[in-house]
Amino acid sequence: MVINMKKKFTSLKIILFFLLLIFAGYYLFVNNFLNHDISYPLVYGNIDISIEADGFLIRDEKIITTNSSGQVQYFVAEGEKIKNNQLVAQIQINTVDEQNTDEGNTMMLPSPSQNVSVSIEDLNYDIAFIFSKIKESISNARYSEIYGLKEELKLKLDKRIRLSALDIQQYNNITVSEKTSDAVTQSVAPMSGIISYYIDGYENILQDINLYQIDFNLMNKQIMDVKNFSTQFVNEGDILYKVVDSNHWKFIALADKFYQDFFDVGGIVQVDIGEEKVSGEVVDIIDQGNNIAVLLNMNHIISDFQKIRKIQVDLLPINYKGLKIENNSLVKVDGEYGVYILNVNNKAVFRLVKIIGYDENYAIVVNNTFKKIINGETTNVNTVKLYDEVLRNGERYINN
């Protein structure tokens, strides 16, 4: 009987031991795992923001035409750098014998009465009208009309030049830079830069003076055809080439408005263009409805810079570094962002934070203290610090 009692007592101790073991395991599980699920220690981290955008290259470029007709010989390759007044092309001028040997008749020059008389006043009116149409087309984003209007404008300007010797450059970017002899016309570069034979018709549109009038959303839908104008033969008024300033250029990046806060005027942005990485300084941020057009001053040229106009890129604003917080921890109290942390008594305590940057999942905040203006005075605000236990789902603790 005594033996049975001892066995029962021993069995009871074993059961109690296992119950205590289970309870201890549960306690450890709750503290080590469940608490880990509701909070986490703050550590240093960084966020790389990559923003997809459609971009447009903005260059200082001059289109060169010719006043001669004939066979062309080029001395500079596409994309080659040249100096001011360097010989780029040579035209063997077409000549016509005064005596037509086939017919035996002398060619007669047309008399002045056979020429079409055009008054400067009429030309000025036509030029002003065409110029206003170009401005209107830019304002209404009818970019496909502009190239034809430019050609019409150039013809009118050519006529007026012959009458009044006015400089064509006051109306557009197209220049003539030639040295002519009886048989040969030599075209020299009007400035230093890069030679290109590719023209897209946007050379005079995408300039600083027009950028705030352009709807880049509509421009982004345009098909930008780039045409190679290098040729074996030219007529008077034809395009020969263009010279592009390689020292200064800008880039317009069209991105979703969601990313507006990632850009600051004066900030540096890395631009990934294919395999190439270049950087630029933010000059301005232009509102484009649901999008923004970020205007960048670029530091280095890219491959085929002289002929590319539209390209897809990845923008990387400055890398954000600091304490890394999960976005679901952030709450807004009285219009200011903060988080709840666990104090020494495991109580939820609110701390204001200063957000440096963020993406879809995390925010980077300042460590220890930050400055804030309160009632006109600059005050140091105590904020989160390294290894603070931050609570997830911070909104749960607002009313506690």
Image (tube, rainbow, N blue to C red):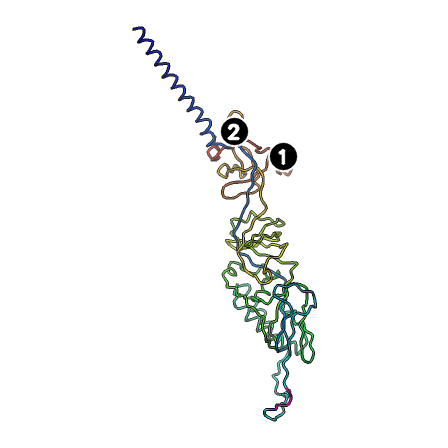
Q: Residue furthest left?
A: 1
Q: Quadrant of residue 76?
A: bottom right
Residue depth check, mark 2 versus mark 1: number of the one nearer the observer: 2
Q: Which mark is residue 380?
A: 1
Q: Nearer the viewer, residue 108 or 274?
A: 274
Mark 1 lies on a secondary structure that is strand
Kind of residue sitting beneath label 2: Leu
- SS assignment at label 2: strand
**Residue at point 50% right, 53% down?**
290
Is residue 274 inside the magenta stretch? Answer: no
Location of residue 116 by image quarter:
bottom right
Image quadrant where residue 162 sits: bottom right
Residue 95 or residue 131, whichever sits in front: 95
Residue 309 position (above or below residue 44): below
Residue 34: image x %, image y %? 44, 29
At label 2, counting other C-alpha atoms closer than 10 Å, the crowd grade (few under 14, some 14-19, many 20 or more) is some
- Residue range (magenta): 97-101
What residue is at 70 percent from the left and 66 percent from the top?
A: 84
Label placed on residue 342: 2
Name the residue located 50 percent from the left edge and 64 percent from the top edge.
223
**Earlier residue among tags 2 and 1:** 2
Q: Is residue 49 above or below residue 162?
A: above
Neighbourhood count class around disc 1 (C-alpha, 10 Å): few under 14, some 14–19, many 20 upward: few
Give whichever of 53, 117 is nearer the camera. 53
Q: x%, y% of residue 148?
A: 54, 71
Assign the N terminus to one quadrant of the image.
Answer: top left
